[in-house]
Image (tube, helix red, strand yellow):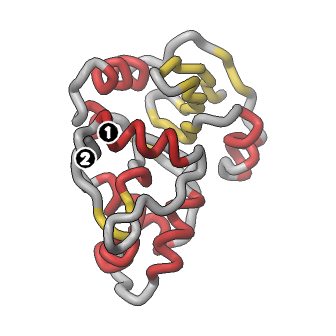
Amino acid sequence: MLTQSIYRTPIGNLYLIAHDQKLLAAGFSNFANLISNLDKNDRASKLNPQKKIPVITDLLNDYFEGNLNALDGISVSQPGERFSQAAWRAMRKVAPGRSISYAELAKRAGSPDAVRAAGSACARNLIALVVPCHRIVKTGGGLGNYAYGLKVKEWLLRYEGLLK
């Protein structure tokens, strides 16, 4: 059985789906969008609505109370090909207040020529905020895209101290 919860943030609701204390999906849109992208077996699981998800909710609270490294304590799992998995691991190593380009993400994921694939990994990231695709920007510093809109990406980067 999976747990679902809605976490209220300063920029809107963050919809969460977890198995025990492992986060499977997080996004600013809705549960239907997240569920449709889960692993096949997880899509078939029953969802148990809860006000909080132990550990995950506490670490989100810590993040929004100023401990920007708190998200590092959240365990995650999402379906994806080998390059996407490598890209998502690389994203988690980008510290709050920092950013890297899509080209640098491709390099850190082990395939320097796969810049478009790095962008696709960002677009397919099912665990927004915790797998911080918002910290990936265009070469030259342009923000690039963000599944939940540039206002959300800008807010997150400003909150984390990258933008003034």
| Residue tagged 2 | 162
Q: Position of residue 128 (x, y in %)?
A: 49, 43
**How much space separates mark 2 and mark 1, taking CA atoms?**
6 Å
Image quadrant occupied by the N terminus:
top right
Residue 4, picture quadrant: top right
Residue name at image x 42 percent, y 20 percent:
57
Residue name at image x 73 percent, y 42 percent:
33
Please, is residue 11 above or below residue 65 in the view? below
Is disc 1 placed on a helix, strand or loop?
helix
Please, is residue 49 above or below residue 153 in the view? above
Image quadrant occupied by the C terminus:
top left
Check contact, mark 2 vs mark 1: CB within 8 A. yes
Q: Position of residue 31 (x, y in %)?
A: 71, 32
* Residue type beneath disc 1: Arg
Within 10 Å of the Cα at label 1, are there few (<14), some (14-19), or many (20+) other Cα atoms? few
Within 10 Å of the Cα at label 2, are there few (<14), some (14-19), or many (20+) other Cα atoms? some
Q: Nearer the viewer, residue 20 or 10?
A: 10
Is disc 2 placed on a helix, strand or loop?
loop
* Residue type beneath disc 2: Leu
Q: Nearer the viewer, residue 112 or 24?
A: 112
Q: Position of residue 101 (x, y in %)?
A: 34, 69
Q: Which mark is residue 114?
A: none
Residue name at image x 71 percent, y 47 percent:
41
Q: Position of residue 19 (x, y in %)?
A: 55, 32
Please, is residue 123 above or below residue 37 in the view? below
**In this rendering, position of residue 72 left or right of residue 132:** left
| Residue tagged 1 | 158
